[in-house]
Every structure is written in structure tokens, then in C-alpha cells.
């Protein structure tokens, strides 16, 4: 009577193991070649771009495409290995498709979040470091994933949005942000002279901040107030620098007008103190 080990066809088993090893080695080689091709493709795109390449977005897309490639190749490899062992992979794939369909109906929001997150990354709707507004929340994007996005507000709150619920995004970091600074002068002052002084200040401001201030100009008289004539100055800056450059512009406006001898009106209080002789004289005149 033959034992179990004697019934095994060792030649066929060795051939089967060799095929499995070759399939796994082939998968690894294909993954390595695919990674190199993906890296090369993104490097070529960056070098031929007319604009400054976004390193964060390039790395995100590069990693995403590599993961998709690896999962696809190994899935095909596993199906080939199962077919070597006599498994009906066609029926297995069909069963997996039915199971996946059932799961997708039960997790529609998750599927929607993942698909939306993919397009947010791929289309560069917003990226890490951008100042955005989503719904009623606004802040700096800290993290973007396929499932959710995280936004940190100016006051420190962390908002976590499922990507599927993001409908409208306002991205303040694309292009220049316009800030209007109103400077008041007294009615007695020469308006044309004040505008000329502020225009010269704008040119100086652009020279001192060439990377941050894209443009600065005097718009003209913005308002005629009760005690002053308001002149509007516009500066165009990245959104993240808007507050510090507004303060710097106000300071330079004040210094420029002071140097030109142009008065900026402010509320004054006059305190009048009568002496004892003046009080007695007032009483005498009253009588």
C-alpha cells in the first residue's frame, strides 16, 4: 500500500512552485518598471511646465499612481496563481463583483468620498497649505486624503470634511488677493498732492516687497467724510500675507503723509480753565 507522500507527483509539484515563483518575480519586475515610468513621466511634466511645479501635488499624484499600479499587477498575479491550482477565477471574479456591488450599496457615502477625494487630488482643486473656504468653515488645508480633508482655522479649530460632502470650494490662494486701505486727509489739504505722495509710496512698497506685493496703486478719492477726505490705496498680495502687508502699508502711508506735511485729521478735545479773576469778571459782567 502506497503512502500519501508516494502518491504525490513531485515533478508536477516542483513545476507548479516554479511557475508561482516566476509569476511573483514577474510582478515585482513589472511594479519596479512601472514605478520608474511613472516617476519619469512626472519629472518630464514638471520640467516642461511653464509655471513653478507644485512639489506637494506631484508627490501625491506620483504615490497614488504607484499604489494603483501595484494593486493592479498583484491582483492579476494572484488570479494567475489561483488558476494554476485549478481555481475557477472567472467565477471568483464574478462573485467578487457581486459582493463588491452589495458592499457599495451599503457604503455609498464611503465610495463617494473616495471618488471625490481622487478628483480633488487629480484636478488640484486645493492642496496642502492653501487657504480655502468650504461651507461656513475657512482656514489652511493641513491634510488631503481620499476619504477626508482637514482644515485648520485662524483661531485653531480643526475642521474635518468628508470629501463627498464638499460641494463648493473658495480657494483664496490662487492668484493675488486685493486689499483696500483707506487713508483720510483734512479738507484743507491738497488732494492732488496727497494722491501723488501715496502713488510714490506705492512704487517704493513694490520695490521693497517684490515677491509678496504683485501690484500697488492709488484708486483715488473713496469717500467724503464729516471731517476728512478718504483716499483708497489697493495692494495685491498672496492671501496668507494680506494682514501683515496691510499693516505695513498703513504705516508707510502715515510716514509718507507726515514727511510731505499733509495732515491726517483726528478728534481733538479742547479743555478751557478759567482763572479766579476771569470768574469774578464773568460774574460782574453778568450782574
Image (tube, grey):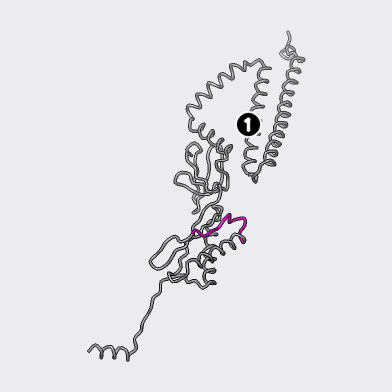
Q: Quadrant of residue 70?
A: top right
- 63 is within the stretch colored magenta: no
- 215 is within the stretch colored magenta: yes
Q: Position of residue 172 (x, y in %)?
A: 52, 48
Q: Residue furthest right?
A: 11
Q: Is 41 placed above or below 15 here?
A: below
Q: Quadrant of residue 71?
A: top right
Q: Is 31 placed above or below 199 here?
A: above
In the picture, the quarter occupied by the N terminus is top right
- Which residue is label 1 attached to? 68
Q: Residue at x 24, y 87 (%)?
A: 286
In the picture, the quarter occupied by the C terminus is bottom left
Looking at the picture, tell me which residue is in the foreground, 169 or 183.
183
| Badge 1 density bin: few <14, some 14–19, many ≥20, Cα 10 Å | few
Q: Residue at x 72, y 29 (%)?
A: 28
What's drawn in magenta, residue-wise?
208-219
Amino acid at each position: 500500500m502506497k503512502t500519501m507522500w508516494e502518491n504525490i507527483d513531485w515533478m508536477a509539484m516542483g513545476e507548479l512552485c516554479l511557475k508561482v515563483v516566476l509569476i511573483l518575480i514577474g510582478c515585482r519586475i513589472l511594479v519596479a518598471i512601472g514605478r520608474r515610468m511613472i516617476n519619469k513621466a512626472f519629472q518630464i511634466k514638471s520640467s516642461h511646465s511653464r509655471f513653478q511645479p507644485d512639489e506637494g501635488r506631484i508627490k501625491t499624484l506620483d504615490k497614488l499612481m504607484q499604489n494603483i499600479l501595484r494593486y493592479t499587477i498583484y491582483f492579476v498575479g494572484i488570479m494567475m496563481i489561483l488558476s494554476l491550482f485549478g481555481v475557477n477565477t472567472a467565477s471568483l471574479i464574478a462573485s467578487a463583483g457581486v459582493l463588491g456591488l452589495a458592499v457599495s450599496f451599503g457604503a455609498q457615502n464611503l465610495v463617494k468620498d473616495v471618488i471625490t477625494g481622487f478628483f480633488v487630488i487629480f484636478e488640484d482643486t486645493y492642496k496642502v497649505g492653501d487657504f480655502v473656504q468650504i461651507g461656513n468653515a475657512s482656514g489652511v488645508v493641513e491634510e488631503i486624503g481620499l476619504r477626508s480633508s482637514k482644515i485648520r482655522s485662524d483661531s485653531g479649530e480643526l475642521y474635518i470634511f468628508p470629501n463627498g460632502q464638499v460641494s463648493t470650494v473658495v480657494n483664496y490662494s490662487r492668484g493675488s488677493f486685493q486689499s483696500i486701505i483707506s487713508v483720510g486727509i483734512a479738507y484743507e489739504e491738497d488732494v492732488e498732492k496727497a494722491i501723488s505722495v501715496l502713488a510714490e509710496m506705492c512704487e517704493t512698497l513694490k520695490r521693497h516687497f517684490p515677491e509678496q506685493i504683485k501690484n500697488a496703486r492709488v484708486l483715488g478719492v473713496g469717500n467724503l467724510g464729516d471731517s476728512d477726505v478718504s483716499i483708497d490705496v489697493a495692494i495685491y498680495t498672496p492671501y496668507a500675507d494680506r494682514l501683515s502687508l496691510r499693516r505695513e502699508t498703513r504705516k508707510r502711508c502715515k510716514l509718507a503723509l507726515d514727511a510731505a506735511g499733509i495732515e491726517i485729521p483726528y478728534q481733538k478735545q479742547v479743555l478751557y480753565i478759567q482763572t479766579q479773576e476771569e470768574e469774578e469778571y464773568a460774574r460782574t459782567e453778568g450782574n
